[in-house]
Image: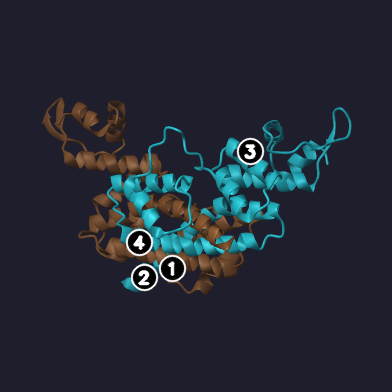
Chain colours: A cyan, B brown
Amino acid sequence: MRISELAAESGVPLPTLKYYLREGLLMPGRSQSRTRADYGPEHLERLRLVRALVEHGGIGIAGARRIIEALDSPPPSRHELLGIAHGALPGSVVEDDAPEPDPSVAAFVERLGWHVEGCAPAIHRLSEAVVRARAAGIELPDADLDRYAAAMRAVAGVDLEVAGRATSAAEAMHTVVVGTVLVDPVLVALRRLAQEAESATRT
Amino acid sequence: MRISELAAESGVPLPTLKYYLREGLLMPGRSQSRTRADYGPEHLERLRLVRALVEHGGIGIAGARRIIEALDSPPPSRHELLGIAHGALPGSVVEDDAPEPDPSVAAFVERLGWHVEGCAPAIHRLSEAVVRARAAGIELPDADLDRYAAAMRAVAGVDLEVAGRATSAAEAMHTVVVGTVLVDPVLVALRRLAQEAESATRT
């Protein structure tokens, strides 16, 4: 189909399509002539992904480009894949001048005994989140954090099982990156519902 | 202290302080004369909360005002408190013209058997999140959603226990509203770490 048809079919306005093409988020169409390119179902699929990431995943254009580059050339091992997938996620860049993780958080992660890199960006994000909560008067003693960690370990078990069902590295990568970003709001909504349900049983 | 001292002490610029006063996010100081007001530790505490909500909780000024109004006049029962707290959270407003929740999601929630209102905003948020994930190629079969729900129910158990430790209704309200918003990023970071740990044990 022509680019105007791609716009109509996908619901993405033509200027946005051209912007995505310039930014490398959408691959070029097959060239038919000097002024015409042909677009197919793979372009529609890519557009669904880009919109999901940019419009709903809270990921900027640069982040979406990193994710798409990684999807286009997935690494061989599943664990390596997860590392690259995590690196493409928002919040995965630790600036050179970022403060060290809060010592209490670093000690907590150490004590969990999980196999995680000491420099994992998620430790920085965890530290920032804990420090912010504390500043707003929400103390998170280790006993509570332990139980939150156990629950999220169960979540991760499902995540990895879902990724394990993928039949190709590219599909696994897609599942980890997109699934991680887009399942976060699912979990957040389930937490609200579960709070209501827990509260009802305690009243 | 004077407003200029409050600015220095809190690190919030003077124009921002005046904006917060105008918007009702910061209560007025005690009037000392026609041109001077006195601010105390309660203002510093309030500013910590406002910054946590607005700068890190992703809550706009209107949302922060709803939260603060609710904190200033908490209801009698704990379950009612949670309802008001949830109503003050971002994403809690369901527009009149919002589409009905996706039937598969409504059926899933029904099947969970949790005590939740059929019109709970979180059901709309869950439906939106599931539909967006699907559009991006992430299927969430009920068997997976069930396990995510069980994990988030465990999280909610901790949440309610923490709120139950509060010694006043105002403190419980603070814990539910602020804790819900500011613990979300803690859980998200723990999920990333847990994925890495799970992946390491499976390789």
Residue mark closest to the camera, 3 vs 1: 3
Q: Identify the subunit bearing mark 3.
A: A
Q: Where is residue A33 shown, x and y percent of the image?
A: 89, 31
Side of A107 where B203 appears, left or right:
right
- Mark 4 lies on residue: B159
**Numbered tag placed on residue A65 in the rendering:** 3
Q: Which residue is mark 1?
A: B116
Labels 1, 4: one chain = yes
- Residue at numbered disc 2: A200
Q: Given the image, on which type of amino acid does mark 3 rest? A: Arg
Asked if the residue under mark 2 is in contact with the one under mark 4, i.e. CB atoms within 8 Å, the reply is no
Q: Marks 4 and 2, Cα distance to the nearest angstrom?
A: 14 Å
Amino acid bearing label 1: Val
Q: Nearer the viewer, residue A163 or A180?
A: A163
Say what secondary structure mark 4 lies in. helix
Looking at the image, is mark 2 or mark 3 earlier in the sequence? 3
Depth order, front residue of A91/A113: A113
Q: Amino acid at mark 2?
A: Ala
In depth, the one of A9 and A100 nearer the eye is A100
Q: Residues within 10 Å of mark 1 (few under 14, many from 20)?
A: many
Label 1 close to label 2 by CB (< 8 Å): yes
Do the residues indicated by labels 3 and 1 lie within the same chain of the protein? no
Residue at 62% across, 43% down: A67
- Residue A141 in the image: above or below residue B144: above
The answer for how far apart the CA atoms under marks 4 and 3 are is 37 Å
1 or 4: mark nearer the eye:
4
